[in-house]
Amino acid sequence: MTILVTGGAGYIGSHTVLHLKEQGEEVVVLDNLSRGHLDALFEAPFYEGDLHDEKLLDEIFHTYDIDAVIHFAASSQVGESVEDPLKYYENNVIGTFHLIRKMVQHNVNRIVFSSTAAIYGDPEFIPVGETNATIPTNPYGETKLAIEKMLQWSDQAYGLKSVSLRYFNAAGADPQGRIGEDHDPETHLIPIVLQVALGQREQVNIFGDDYPTEDGTCIRDYIHVMDLAEAHYLAVKKLKETNESAVYNLGNGQGFSVKQVIETCERVTGVFIPSTVSFRRTGDPAVLVAASDKARGELKWIPQYPSLEAIVSHAWDWHKSYPYGFQTKLPT
Ligand SMILES: NC(=O)c1ccc[n+]([C@@H]2O[C@H](COP(=O)([O-])OP(=O)(O)OC[C@H]3O[C@@H](n4cnc5c(N)ncnc54)[C@H](O)[C@@H]3O)[C@@H](O)[C@H]2O)c1
Ligand SMILES: O=c1ccn([C@@H]2O[C@H](COP(=O)(O)OP(=O)(O)O[C@H]3O[C@H](CO)[C@@H](O)[C@H](O)[C@H]3O)[C@@H](O)[C@H]2O)c(=O)[nH]1
């Protein structure tokens, strides 16, 4: 297959590109490098450009016979989306609109879309199944939900088949240490805690300890980035086999509080992690834990690295080798 990966120089995208290449698939990458890194890419044809650039999309779809698109390119920070919602509507909703319009015009009719647990908002039932109500608590989740709906209507109208993968919290790194998570600024919990372990930050700021959870801090379901990569591969194959649209949650089904994540990082790194408690971050739901039985059953998806220790330990290996990101690999 030839697969166009948008956002393929980003964190989850680059791990998926690596996995697809290892499975022998052809990959073409489109990324505007606003958050991605050339160093994260493995020998794939690369277009530096934007989803909004329809001429560039025409060029890609003319040049390659694309079997499917895996669409990661987006803005994806919950806090930023609350502060600047229009950025999220522009980059996520309008950006995807251009992509879908060009796919329809060029008769490319399979897409795997990066959706998110954030579309559920503060779920009534835990673990959250795909049929739970979708009431986002932040603009980021709203834009992802709008895209899911755009995809559903595009299936009905144009026969565009999609799999929306609602992932919970991506974490970890390539177990062989070739690539990892490099965001500047970093906003995700695990890399921030590891930056404290590396001595790059003085402490972790815990966003609220007055949530209705056992220790008062937010609970999330952390899923290894390579397990997400495999789920994308399985989703593309399923789309090709069945030609049916679907929606799947992707998580481990186990929740960890912010404090438990910090404790796990202390165990893995052997370093004491100082922390302080501040106000809640607006838009954060208290608990997000996935029911992923549907993906396990229909995609035959079996996460290989479900333990938080393994996830943190792969992330730690990468951060130790590249303490300030891709530009700073230390000699081994
Ligand atoms: N990280 C998570 O925990 C998580 C969880 C659920 C869903 N997601 C979704 O998964 C996807 C990937 O997330 P990530 O953590 O790898 O993010 P990331 O920021 O590392 O990757 C996104 C990539 O898309 C590129 N990009 C952004 N806007 C673009 C545009 N308009 N045109 C071209 N390229 C553009 C960026 O340069 C970056 O390389 C996103 O859609 C995100 O919403 C992430
Ligand atoms: O310095 C920090 C950073 C985070 N947190 C907390 O840690 C948890 C995890 O936060 P973070 O790593 O920023 O992830 P989320 O905000 O849960 O969002 C991630 O996970 C979502 C799915 O659950 C995705 O949709 C988003 O794209 C992705 O960024 C949250 O409770 C935060 O409040 C802190 O307490 N301190």
Image (cartoon, rainbow, N blue to C red):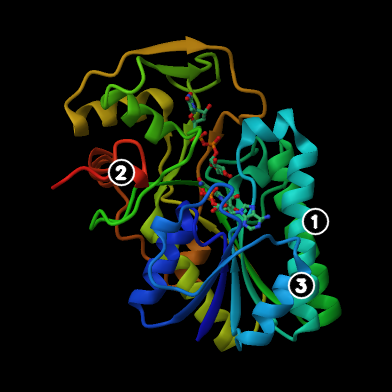
The Cα atoms of the two marked residues, 1 and 3, are separated by 15 Å
Q: Nearer the viewer, residue 143 or 90?
A: 90
In the rendered structure, which amino acid carries the disc numbered 1?
Ile
Q: Which residue appears at 30% of the width and 54% of the height? A: 305
Q: CA distance from mark 1 to mark 2?
A: 33 Å
**Quadrant in the picture for residue 239:** bottom right
> Which residue lies at the image location 51% right of the left edge and 47% below the top edge?
168
Q: Secondary structure at mark 3?
A: helix
Q: What is the spatial separation of the Cα atoms under label 3 and label 2, in whole angstroms?
A: 38 Å
Q: Residues within 10 Å of mark 1 (few under 14, many from 20)?
A: some
Closest to the observer: 72 or 217? 72
Name the residue beneath numbered marker 1. 94
- Residue 135 visible in the current orientation: no
Compared to residue 251, the image places residue 247 above or below, namely below
Name the mark on residue 269.
none
Compared to 197, does 147 lie above or below?
below
Which residue bears the numbered disc 2? 315
Mark sitting earlier along the chain (1/2): 1
- Left of 295 or right of it: where is 135? right
Q: Which is nearer the N-term, disc 1 or disc 3? A: 3
Residue depicted at x 48% and y 31% = 219
How far from the left and from the top, in percent, is residue 92?
A: 72, 52
Q: Is residue 168 visible?
A: yes
Query: For mark 3, what is the residue?
Result: 55
Q: Position of residue 24 (x, y in %)?
A: 37, 83
